[in-house]
Amino acid sequence: MSTEPRINDRIRVPEVRLVGPSGEQVGIVPLAKALELAQEYDLDLVEVAATARPPVCKLMDYGKFKYESAMKAREARKNQAHTVIKEMKLRPKIDPHDYDTKKGHVVRFLKQGDKVKITIMFRGREQSRPELGFRLLQRLADDVQDLGFIESSPKQDGRNMIMVLGPHKKKTEAMAEARAIADARKAERQGRNTGPDAAADDDDAALEAENAAAEAEAEADEIDDADDNDEAAEAVVEADVEAAAEVEQPAEASQGA
């Protein structure tokens, strides 16, 4: 079913309660009279309250009304702040370089006003050392205490230990600051482009774009390297477990003999 109101000839009632273009009350009039007034004002007859008896109709420019309603809805969605929980996974024996990389992501998420779920993944013998994960989580919380706080204390969940960090800054404030910075940069670029050094500024902007792309690519490589290091560490732990099992089996066999 269509949610749009009925307009003009689509209205099928004998009489309507008519509201004028400026909001004035015309009163109850026959539908034919209301359509005649709509043609006279070069406007549309729009049914705004279909459940009323008789239905309420208003004289308006329906195309303009739809456009303004869409713009208002778009602005409302733009100002909405949705709470997002990001997730970052670490290993107890994480490399210092990988730790700095992932800490940078946590800092970026908190600056954006998002919550961050930190998960420490234990594998093999690491499960017998939960204090390693607790110390790592506490270290991370201390490193980002200027941007966030511990919303949920570290808790053991099977092979994982989980902690949730909440941002000091609200999502709406972070969005407003980001928009202000973007507007300031845009105004600065426009001001430079109108000056005598516009060509040089364009070259600088192109160089900045290339550098930003290179940094993004390097950051992606760092994330991939971090994941590879995690997988390698996991493989080493599993190999240690298998080696220990092989040593224990001959010992048991000798005792049985």
Image (cartoon, grey):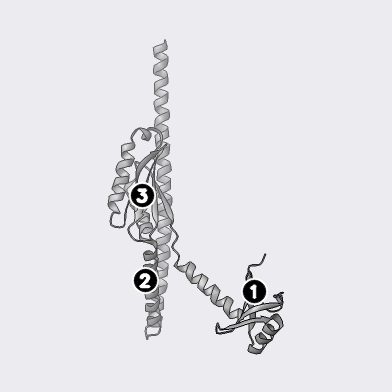
Q: Amino acid at mark 2?
A: Ile
Q: Quadrant of residue 180?
A: bottom left
Observer-side mark, 1 or 3, equals 1
Tag 3 residue? 98
Q: In the image, which disc is placed on residue 181?
A: 2
**Residue 241 position (above or below residue 101):** above
State the SS at label 3.
Answer: helix
The CA span between labels 2 and 3 is 30 Å
Instruction: Give the side of residue 60 with respect to residue 230, left or right.
Output: right
Viewer-nearest residue: 157 or 92: 157
The reply to whether dot 2 and dot 1 touch (C-beta < 8 Å) is no
Which quadrant is home to the C terminus? top left
Q: Residue placed at 29% from the left, 47% from the top? A: 139
Observer-side mark, 2 or 3, equals 2
Number of residues whose C-alpha sits closer than 10 Å to that of mark 2, classed few (under 14), some (14–19) or many (20 or more): few
Q: Amino acid at mark 3?
A: Asp
Residue 66: % across, % down: 58, 76
Residue 247: % across, % down: 39, 23
Whichever of labels 1 and 3 marks the residue nearer the N terminus, that label is 1
Q: Amino acid at mark 1?
A: Pro
Q: In the image, which disc is placed on residue 55?
A: 1
Residue 80: % across, % down: 45, 65
Number of residues whose C-alpha sits closer than 10 Å to that of mark 3, classed few (under 14), some (14–19) or many (20 or more): many
Which quadrant is home to the N terminus? bottom right
Number of residues whose C-alpha sits closer than 10 Å to that of mark 1, classed few (under 14), some (14–19) or many (20 or more): some
Residue reaching furthest to the bottom? 40
The CA span between labels 2 and 1 is 49 Å
State the SS at label 1.
Answer: loop
Q: In the image, which disc is placed on residue 199?
A: none
Residue 191: % across, % down: 38, 82
